[in-house]
Structures are given as structure tokens and as C-alpha cells.
């Protein structure tokens, strides 16, 4: 046995040991890129344009797409692994561009019924962007990112910010510099930063050309966030606070800001809580368009996280329906127990303000409408991952897509938010946005689905198989990976 094959044997043994929890044999990565995987006779959904290209063959070697062309002309190398795609549709893998990892993912057995990594893959989510790992001495997410990159861990490709910079912060410059040194992909800024802390954090990040994204700090406001050059807004809902007239100079700290702004909002919105979508559009549409135009002029993308609005309303008004959803069996058991006891996060926070929750849901829909109309780049994100909000990793991204198509997006436009637009922000973030379309040279992140996703967004849920960075998971493997024991 030569050294090379010895290493291959050790690596595959490690993988088998590492995956023994799943009691199935997972596909081993072909890091050396010697084996070609050929998808034959597929209907290609390249996402470079709104089109389907019939009878195509796609060759994958290592982590990359190396050839795309007519099945009649592409030469498939001997010994290739063949995947018959006759009648099926091959599209780029999806990205959840706003989610949160937790360090309990490592030891998920005690918390989650199934590993969140597997939930993502099984839903065709091949990229996740962590909008804030937990603070701690152990930079767990950087380790996972690197392990997945070099094939030692199964999961979607990870991009990550450093721990959230909430505010107040003792030394924003030092905090930002520390995160940059550790190798995080971007800086996440939060609602409670003072003007001074926000500016200092921004200046430090800008000097290092580091990407910044986050909430609109209450003391700063949209106008100054844009003029300081924050690269991305973390939620559509961030813009809703611009409709509230509150005192930005009030001497508050931390979470007290949230309480103050929400109470002020509730008081000011009270006469309008009963307005339907159309009436709300009449009242706030013009202002929403003006905000959206500012965001567009600054070339700042906005993450969606809109399904969460629906989940909050459902948790409060139809708890039985929430509990009976099949995918919610994948939520942490302790979360479900807390929910049944009425101790869940939003049950505690929003109780008594149910009308406000559904009002805010409608306001966010209006904001989405005008962000789209103004041409702002919308980026797909669900805010899942913590397990404590009622959002199931992976499954929630399909709900997010559904919400978009129910609010003026065609399936193509919706898919774009989780593929093309996701890659564009990643490219700006760290020049590694080499995914999101099916083109030669792109990372081989793919979903093979039964029916045309451009006709009906729900078709993406009928998955034949998923490829993440060149590693293929058949439907049977994926089912095993998320089987509830
Ligand atoms: Zn978040």
C-alpha cells in the first residue's frame, strides 16, 4: 500500500467512525477529484437567466462543475459515476444567508432529534451564512467551516460573522480587529450600539475592507447606517422601525432600547392595527418606497427572514396547528416542552400584543413589496438554527421561498434570492461567491428535483438528490440522514 492509498484508507475510516451516529454509510468525498460524476439528460435550471435547457449533461470533478453541454455531444469519461436525470431538473443548491449556529450542533444528540447539518442538506441547502455564533472561548464555527471545506465533516458550506456586537461595547475597535484576526468572514452589528460605537466599529472594519452587516442601530437610524457604508441589512423588518417616531438620544442601554422602541411603536401604531394590507399600503406605501429607494441608491442588499413573522403569529394564535406541523418534530425537544408550557420566547415576549404581531407581519410585506419595486437586492434568509424560535433548519428556507412567491415574486425571482443574490453578497464579502448558478467552474452545489421549479416553487421540495461541494447525497441517503429514531 503506497502512502497515498494509506491516507485514503485512514480518511475513509475516520469518516465511517465520525458518521457512526447516522448508522448509514455516507458518501465519501473525492477530494483528489479523480472520479467524475456525470448528471445525464437533465433539464438544466442554470439561473443565469430565466430558462430551462433540455437534455444536458453536467460533469463534476472534485468540488467543481467542469463541463456542461448537450447530452449528445459531451463525452463522459470512462469510470464516471452516472446519475440519470431523465425528466428531472438540475438547479443550484440553495443558501440560507441568515441563520445562526449553536455550539450544541456538535453534540446534537442531547438537544436536536437530528443534526441540523443534515436538516440543511436534506432540504437542498448547500450554503449557510451564520449571522452570529455564540460568544465563547471556542471558535467552534470556524473549525466546522474548515472541516467541511476539506471534507472532514458533512454539511453545507459555511460562511460566518464573528459573535454579534450588540452594544454597548467597551472597545469596538479592538473587538472588530480581534474578529478579523480570527478569520471571520464578516462583522455583525446590532441594534443597541451607540452612534460612537457604531462609527468606531465601522471605521475599523472599513480600514480592513471587512464586510459589515446587521441591524440598524436604534441610535443611528437608516440614513446614517447607509452613509457610513454598512454593507447589508439583516432583516426586512429593520426598516419598519423607521416608521416609528422615537427619541434616538434617549440615554438607554442594551435591551432597554428594544422595550422602549416596541412600546413606542405599539402606542403609535395602535389606531392602525386593524388595517388590512391594502389599507396599510395606502398609509405606509409611499414612505416604504422612499426608504427602499435610499437602500437601493446605497447598493445595500437586505435579507428576508419573513417566514418568522408567520411563525410568530401562528405560535400565538394557533398553537395546536404549530405543534402539528410534521417538520416541527425536528425542533429541540426542550423547545417543544417549553412551548407546551407557554414559556417559549415569543409566547413570553408578545403575549397580549397578538394584534401587533399580525400588524407587523403586514407591514413587513409592504416593505418587501417596495424593496422589490425599487430594485434592492433581496437575499434569502430564515433566521433558523438556534432551535429556540420555532424555525426548523432547512425546512424553513422552503417556507421563506413560499412567502416570497405569495408576495409578488415569480419562482425564478424567489430562487434568485437564495442562489444568484446569495453568491453576489458572498463575493463582496470574501470573494468566494463561486456558486449560485450552473456554470463551468462553479462549486458543484446542486439539487436534482422531479419537476420544474420555475413553474411552482414547491417543486423544489421533491428532491431526488443533493450535491454539496461535489459530494452526492441520494434521496435515500438524505432520508436516512434525517430519519427520526
Ligand atoms: Zn438573526
Image (cartoon, helix red, strand yellow):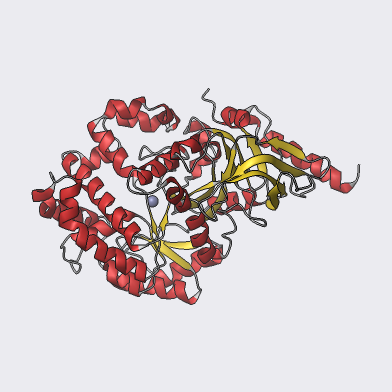
Instruction: Specify the quadrant of the image occupied by residue 284.
Output: bottom left
Residue 333 lies left or right of residue 117; in this view the side is left
Spot occupied by residue 93 in the image (x, y as percentages of width and height): 55, 46
Measured as percent of width and height from the top left, residue 208 is found at 51, 74
Which residue is at a point 75% across and 48% down the rendered structure image? 74
Outermost residue toward the top?
A: 485
Q: Position of residue 275 (x, y in %)?
A: 14, 46
- Please identify the quarter of the rendering in which residue 247 is found: bottom left
What count of labels does the image hold?
Answer: 0
Q: Residue at x 39, y 65 (%)?
A: 300
Q: In the depicted view, which residue is nearer to us: 214 or 443?
A: 443
Q: Position of residue 44 (x, y in %)?
A: 60, 45
Q: Is 386 drawn above or below residue 187 in the view shown?
A: above
16 relative position to 116: left or right? right
Quadrant location of the N terminus in the rendered image: top right
Q: Residue at x 16, y 55 (%)?
A: 282
Image quarter of residue 334:
top left
Work out whether 451 lies above or below 420.
Answer: above
Amino acid at each position: 500500500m503506497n502512502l497515498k492509498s494509506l491516507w485514503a484508507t485512514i480518511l475513509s475510516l475516520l469518516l465511517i467512525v465520525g458518521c457512526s451516529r447516522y448508522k448509514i454509510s455516507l458518501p465519501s468525498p473525492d477530494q483528489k477529484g479523480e472520479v467524475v460524476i456525470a448528471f445525464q439528460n437533465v433539464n438544466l435550471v442554470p439561473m443565469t437567466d430565466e430558462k430551462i435547457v433540455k437534455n444536458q449533461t453536467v460533469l463534476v470533478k472534485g468540488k467543481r462543475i467542469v463541463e456542461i453541454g448537450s447530452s449528445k455531444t459531451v463525452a463522459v469519461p470512462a469510470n464516471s459515476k452516472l446519475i440519470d436525470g431523465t425528466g428531472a431538473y438540475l438547479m443550484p443548491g440553495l443558501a440560507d444567508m441568515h441563520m445562526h449556529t449553536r455550539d450544541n450542533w456538535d453534540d446534537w444528540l442531547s438537544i436536536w432529534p437530528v443534526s441540523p447539518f443534515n436538516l440543511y442538506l436534506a432540504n437542498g441547502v448547500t450554503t449557510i451564512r451564520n449571522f452570529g455564533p455564540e460568544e465563547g472561548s471556542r471558535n467552534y464555527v470556524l473549525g466546522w467551516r474548515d472541516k467541511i471545506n476539506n471534507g472532514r465533516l458533512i454539511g453545507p458550506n459555511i460562511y460566518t460573522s464573528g459573535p454579534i456586537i450588540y452594544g454597548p461595547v467597551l472597545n469596538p475597535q479592538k473587538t472588530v480587529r480581534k474578529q478579523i484576526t480570527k478569520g471571520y468572514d464578516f462583522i455583525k452589528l446590532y441594534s443597541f450600539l451607540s452612534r460612537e460605537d457604531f462609527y468606531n466599529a465601522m471605521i475599523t472594519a472599513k480600514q480592513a475592507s471587512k464586510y459589515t452587516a446587521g441591524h440598524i442601530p436604534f441610535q443611528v437610524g437608516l440614513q446614517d447606517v447607509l452613509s457610513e457604508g454598512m454593507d447589508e441589512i439583516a432583516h426586512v423588518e429593520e426598516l419598519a422601525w423607521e416608521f416609528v417616531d422615537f427619541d434616538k438620544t434617549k440615554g438607554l442601554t442594551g435591551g432597554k432600547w428594544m422595550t422602549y422602541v416596541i412600546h413606542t411603536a405599539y402606542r403609535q401604531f395602535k389606531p392602525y392595527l386593524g388595517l388590512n394590507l391594502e389599507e396599510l399600503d395606502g398609509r405606509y406605501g409611499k414612505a416604504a418606497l422612499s426608504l427602499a429607494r435610499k437602500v437601493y441608491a446605497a447598493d445595500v442588499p437586505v435579507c428576508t427572514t419573513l417566514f418568522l413573522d408567520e411563525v410568530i403569529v401562528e405560535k400565538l394564535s394557533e398553537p395546536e396547528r404549530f405543534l402539528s406541523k410534521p417538520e416541527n418534530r425536528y425542533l429541540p425537544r426542550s423547545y417543544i416542552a417549553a412551548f407546551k408550557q407557554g414559556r417559549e420566547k415569543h409566547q413570553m415576549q408578545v403575549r397580549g400584543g397578538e394584534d401587533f404581531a399580525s400588524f407587523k407581519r403586514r407591514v413587513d410585506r409592504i416593505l418587501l413589496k417596495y424593496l422589490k419595486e425599487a430594485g434592492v437586492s433581496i437575499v434569502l434568509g430564515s433566521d433558523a438554527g438556534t432551535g429556540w424560535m420555532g424555525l426548523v433548519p432547512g425546512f424553513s428556507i422552503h417556507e421563506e421561498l413560499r412567502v416570497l412567491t405569495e408576495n409578488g415574486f415569480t419562482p425564478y425571482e424567489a430562487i434568485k434570492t437564495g442562489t444568484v443574490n446569495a453568491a453576489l453578497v458572498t463575493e463582496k464579502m470574501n470573494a468566494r461567491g463561486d456558486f449560485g448558478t450552473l456554470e463551468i467552474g462553479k462549486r458543484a452545489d446542486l439539487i436534482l428535483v422531479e419537476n420544474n421549479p420555475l413553474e411552482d416553487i414547491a417543486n423544489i421540495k421533491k428532491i431526488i438528490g443533493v450535491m454539496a461541494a461535489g459530494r452526492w447525497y441520494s434521496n435515500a441517503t438524505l432520508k436516512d440522514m434525517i430519519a427520526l429514531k
